[in-house]
Amino acid sequence: MEQMTLKLSVWRQANRNAPGKMVDYTVKNVSSDMSFLEVLDILNEDLVRQGEDPIAFDYDCREGICGSCGVVVNGVAHGPQPATTACTLFMRH
């Protein structure tokens, strides 16, 4: 199982009237078997521990069925794998 460090650039905006900006985050010890949403969970745990607001994202089933995984990866809804939801987009891809 390969371990990696990821750099994520995330659009952060407190509310619809607030100015937003891209914020870079580093997530360490990511397994190639993790889904993209699991990586966001790890990042959110770190953010909460540091007293920061977690990243908001939509999901429901986390089984690749509902299609509600609301993320854009490198400009592509749900990420680069065709016919793959973000919850089933694994880091090994």
Image: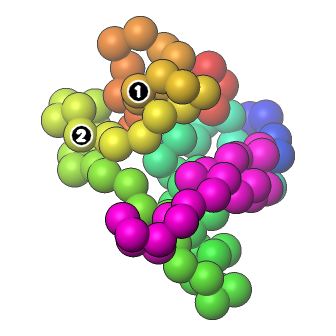
Tally the numbered discs: 2
Q: Is residue 28 above or below residue 17?
A: above
Residue count near mark 2 (Cα–Cα under 10 Å), binned few <14, some 14–19, many ≥20:
some
Residue drawn at (48%, 14%) of the image:
81
Q: From the viewer's side, name the closer residue of 89 and 69.
A: 69
Stretch in magenta: 6-27
Give left or right: position of 2 versus 78: right
Look at label 1 and name its amino acid. Answer: Ala
Give left or right: position of 61 versus 44: left
Q: Is residue 12 above or below residue 45?
A: above
Q: From the viewer's side, name the closer residue of 2 and 19.
A: 19
Q: Can residue 91 be seen in this view?
A: yes
Position of residue 87 measured from the top left corner of the image (x, y, whole percent): 39, 38
Residue bearing mark 2: 68
Position of residue 65 measured from the top left corner of the image (x, y, whole percent): 19, 31
Residue drawn at (41%, 27%) of the image:
77
Residue drawn at (61%, 51%) of the image:
10
Tell me, yes or no, whether the highlighted magenta stretch contains residue 14: yes
Q: From the viewer's side, name the closer residue of 66 and 76.
A: 76
Q: From the viewer's side, name the closer residue of 19 and 40.
A: 19
Q: Nearer the viewer, mark 2 or mark 1?
A: 1
Give left or right: position of 4 versus 10: right
Q: Is mark 2 on a helix, strand or loop?
A: loop
Residue bearing mark 1: 77
Residue drawn at (69%, 86%) of the image:
50
Look at label 2 and name its amino acid. Answer: Ser
Residues under numbered marks 2 and 1 in contact, where contact means CB atoms less than 8 Å apart: no
Residue count near mark 1 (Cα–Cα under 10 Å), binned few <14, some 14–19, many ≥20:
some
| Main SS, magenta residues | strand
Q: Is mark 1 on a helix, strand or loop?
A: strand
What is the C-alpha distance between the residues marked 2 and 1? 11 Å
